[in-house]
Amino acid sequence: MSFPKDIEIIDIGIGFPYQSIEEKTATYQFMRPLYKDKDSLGLFEFPAQYMFKDVPDIIDPSEDPIDWTVAQMDKYNIKIATTGIDERGQEAKKRYPDRFYHALEIWPNNVSETVAQIKEAKRDFDIKYVGCFPCGQFPQIPIDDPKMYPVYATCVELDIPIFINAGIVGPRMPSSPQFVERLDVICYDFPELVIVTRHGCEPWEKLAVKLMLKWPGLHYCTSAFAPKHYPPAIIDYANTRGADKIIYCGYFPAGLSLERQMSEMENVSFRDHVWPKFLRENVARVLHLDI
């Protein structure tokens, strides 16, 4: 079956646009201590600029970023998205309480502070997941680093999943913290933990499939990938034994337009039973959404 347009999509990869290039550049300053090449240090507007073109993430200052985003979601039948607990995220949840759920992105070099932050965010904002970018930490923190173990234990305690980048990192920095093989020991040590990988797992997507077959709690989302670039191993897995493990996640407006994502979705060769799971049901189950 081709891409069904009557399913109300849940997208945990929706963000809000910037109103100026200065605002955009400031957002990525946390990675600056990791850069060494001149493009990343001076020429790039954002860290993985060499990988994307026509990024739709800056709007006219007269436009409201939240209303603009919701209008785009409505256009493409995206019913629900996640947002942070910063000022804009809280305002989005206030205006559209049925359209947004909160998530927390963490910076776990200070372990005890991070654990406290996760517990407070769950209590005060009912966050639905914790997100982590191992290569983007300074210093970097590998997926299987001891500093991450209290984070994983806290997620198990609170019954929330962790979404974690895995595979070669886009920005020009070392990728070893995100090697996919590191997930194996985490799934072993935390059998009750639900993990969702972000940003593709390439070039080890076949290894990711093997690990998902092995570990019940391990899942994969398609964040930062245009549909025409979904790895064949992931599509094959979804169509066979992995229909419950693959989750749709876009990258709008940080890297890809919704128009491109939804038009390219027409050519993704998922089987009929996969589409509702991929677009909605799997993430609803993982996030414990009562919808």
Image (spheres, rainbow, N blue to C red):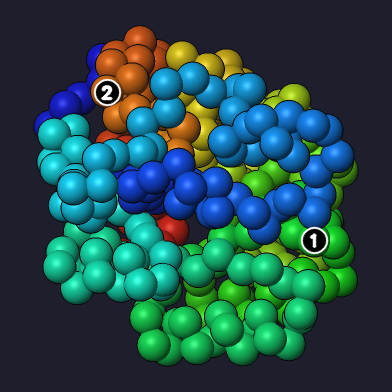
C-alpha separation, residue under disc 2 versus residue under disc 1: 35 Å
Q: Residue 259 shows which numbered tag? A: 2
149 lies left or right of 66: right
89 lies left or right of 224: left
| Residue at which label 1 appears | 138
Please say if 211 is above or below 156.
above
At x 19%, y 53%, the residue is 64
- Image quadrant where residue 254 sits: top left
Q: Position of residue 49 (x, y in %)?
A: 59, 28
Given this view, does label 2 or label 1 mark the residue nearer the observer? 1
**In the image shown, does 92 or 54 lie closer to the viewer?**
54
Q: Residue 118 shows which numbered tag? A: none
**In the image shown, does 234 or 51 lie closer to the viewer?**
51
Q: Position of residue 113 (x, y in %)?
A: 68, 86
**In the image shown, does 23 or 203 lie closer to the viewer?**
23
At x 15%, y 64%, the residue is 96
Q: What's the amino acid at mark 2? A: Glu
